[in-house]
Image (cartoon, grey):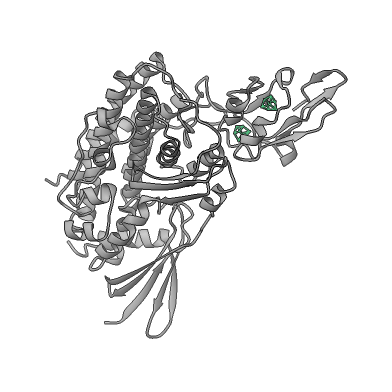
């Protein structure tokens, strides 16, 4: 059978680690995948070196609109470690609350995107409608729907007073109900099962060997979670479960993410009810003495690592960020071998790289004759839905 | 455990519930009172120290000569990221974060605000 090369990407304006996937396909089956990184490089790390620590926070927050709090938490923790600062307990709890709200909003966003990729647009719209609750809570606390700007070096910038706490607690229960409904829906609706069950599984040993993190790893039965393994902020004091699934396939990733929303709701409730009294910040000097620190946090997509080196001035000498998608891309590339072309959108979307929000070009090059045809992401998505609709592979 | 039609009750419920979106600009979703909107300068309080400009991450504040003793901050709302850091950095509480968020303008100049200084009294310029 003729082998084709099927390039996907590299322009993904919505993704923080833009990637180009080169699929080698034999008929409908993917036999090999090549991932190329490094497009759309924004130079944020370099730009940090010419800004002071306060400005860096806002710049790093904009690495990603969805994991913004994870990035600032990681950076602030790193700088606080160099400074030897211990932030107040109240600030730790507020960091946890925002982080978990961010996780809920990210996972619900993912659920919608996944629904869209498999042609279940009703799920997409309902999930995004319900996600508004979380964005409203975030706006209520921080004054912003995205890029909440809650962290500062030495603590958090805004308090959550009693009235707000009660208001938020009232909004969380209906949300938890909705998530229960979605979990039930995704695990029982034939459309979801046909597209998610046993598609592109990553077995546990491969997930470890390829260094997956976050929900992608946990869906392969690996119990890794920075919140449990290396507790930061107030996670050591808050009880929660690490959700895992033994499935390894796309359905497993959906189950893990939806289960995590439930856990996040519990964490937020606990943190709101047990919020310690006290100040929000400790005073941090503008100049940071020479030193270096590595700090990690569990972002919605997995382990996010920041490295900071200070040289005694008011701006960092070096900042390095390893965001979770980078760790997950390769396992996903591996797992695609043996999958179908029609599965490409949902498999890539399954690691939640905010990949699917934009149209992009796909070029079909026939390797022997060199002819090529061009498809957009949207066409590929429709192709996938049609392909399954015609009852291939059942 | 595949069950057809799990979504139907939800679909029917949604048929009879009001839309989740609003008809902007005829109506709009209200913002909370401490929303982080447009930062405004309270000129009487400003000492012209320039701390706000130093910490603004978006270079939205420029210290300009207005004829007063020291330069005063001018805002470029096209650049502003609405992070409220300027208000936090200011030691004289001279910057207020308002809930104002209808900031669209026809050109870039319409998004700039430069303080005006008349004699000994400082007066905010019109927009
Ligand atoms: S709100 Fe932030 S971006 Fe806007 S002027 Fe103030 S410091 Fe600059
Ligand atoms: S920090 Fe405050 S007092 Fe200083 S220039 Fe800015 S607005 Fe004026």
x then y, percent, for residue A124: 35, 43
Callout count:
0
x then y, percent, for residue A87: 40, 28
The residue positioned farthest toward the right in the image shown: B119
The residue positioned farthest toward the top in the image shown: A163
Give the image quadrant in which the ligand numbered 2 is located. top right
Quadrant of the rendered structure where residue A226 is? Answer: top left
Q: Which part of the image, by quadrant, shows the C terminus of chain B?
A: top right
x then y, percent, for residue A339: 24, 65
Q: Residue at x 81, y 32 (%)?
A: B65
Q: Residue at x 22, y 57 (%)?
A: A208
Q: Is residue B67 above or below residue A119?
A: above
Residue B7: tell me if it is visible.
no
Q: Is residue A246 above or below residue A341?
A: above
A189 or A84: nearer the eye? Answer: A84
Q: Residue at x 17, y 44 (%)?
A: A188
Q: Residue at x 17, y 50 (%)?
A: A221
Residue A317: tell me if it is visible.
yes
Image-based side of A301 in relation to B83, left or right: left
A30 or A209: nearer the eye? Answer: A209
The residue positioned farthest toward the left in the image shown: B1
Q: Which part of the image, by quadrant, shows the N terminus of chain B?
A: top left
């Amino acid at each position: 059978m003729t082998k084709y090369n099927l390039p996907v990407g590299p322009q993904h304006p919505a993704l923080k680690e833009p990637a180009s996937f080169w699929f080698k396909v034999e008929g409908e089956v993917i036999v090999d995948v090549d991932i190329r990184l490094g497009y759309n490089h924004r130079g944020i790390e370099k730009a940090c070196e010419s800004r002071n620590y306060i400005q860096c926070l806002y710049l790093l927050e904009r690495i990603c609109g969805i994991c913004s709090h994870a990035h600032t938490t990681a950076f602030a923790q790193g700088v606080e470690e160099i400074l030897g600062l211990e932030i107040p307990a109240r600030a730790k709890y507020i960091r946890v609350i925002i982080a978990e709200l961010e996780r809920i909003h990210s996972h619900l966003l993912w659920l919608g995107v996944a629904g869209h990729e498999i042609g279940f647009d009703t799920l997409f719209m309902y999930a995004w409608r319900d996600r508004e609750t979380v964005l409203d809570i975030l706006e209520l606390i921080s004054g912003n729907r995205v890029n909440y700007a809650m962290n500062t070096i030495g603590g958090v910038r805004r308090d959550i007073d009693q009235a707000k706490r009660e208001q938020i607690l009232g909004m969380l229960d209906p949300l938890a109900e909705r998530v229960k409904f979605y979990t039930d829906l995704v695990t029982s609706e034939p459309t979801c099962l046909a597209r998610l069950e046993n598609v592109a599984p990553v077995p546990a040993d491969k997930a470890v060997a390829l260094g997956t993190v976050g929900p992608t790893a946990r869906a392969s039965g690996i119990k890794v979670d920075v919140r449990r393994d290396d507790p930061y902020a107030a996670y050591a004091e808050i009880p929660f479960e690490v959700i895992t699934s033994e499935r390894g396939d796309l359905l497993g990733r959906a189950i893990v993410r939806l289960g995590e929303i439930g856990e996040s709701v519990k964490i937020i409730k606990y943190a709101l009810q047990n919020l310690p009294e006290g100040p929000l910040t400790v005073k941090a000097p503008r100049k940071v003495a020479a030193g270096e620190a590595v700090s990690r946090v569990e972002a919605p997509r997995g382990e996010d690592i920041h490295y900071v080196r200070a040289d005694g001035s008011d701006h960092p000498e070096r900042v390095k960020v390893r965001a979770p998608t980078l760790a997950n891309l390769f396992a996903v590339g591996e797992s695609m071998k043996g999958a179908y072309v029609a599965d490409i959108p949902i498999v890539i979307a399954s690691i939640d790289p905010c990949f699917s929000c934009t149209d992009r070009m796909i070029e079909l090059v026939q390797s022997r004759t060199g002819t090529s045809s061009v498809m957009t992401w949207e066409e590929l998505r429709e192709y996938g839905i049609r392909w399954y609709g015609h009852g291939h592979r059942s | 455990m595949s069950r057809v039609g799990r979504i139907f009750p939800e679909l029917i419920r949604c048929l009879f519930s009001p839309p989740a979106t609003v008809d902007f600009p005829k109506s709009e979703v209200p913002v909370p009172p401490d929303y982080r909107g447009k930062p405004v300068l309270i000129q009487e309080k400003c000492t012209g120290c320039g701390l706000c400009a130093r910490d603004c991450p978006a270079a939205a504040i420029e210290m300009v000569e207005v004829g007063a003793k020291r330069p005063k901050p001018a805002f470029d709302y096209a650049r502003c990221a609405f992070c409220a850091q300027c208000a936090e950095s200011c030691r004289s509480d001279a910057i207020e974060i308002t809930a104002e968020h209808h900031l669209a303008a026809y050109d870039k100049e319409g998004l700039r605000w430069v303080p005006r200084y008349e004699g000994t009294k400082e007066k905010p310029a019109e927009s």
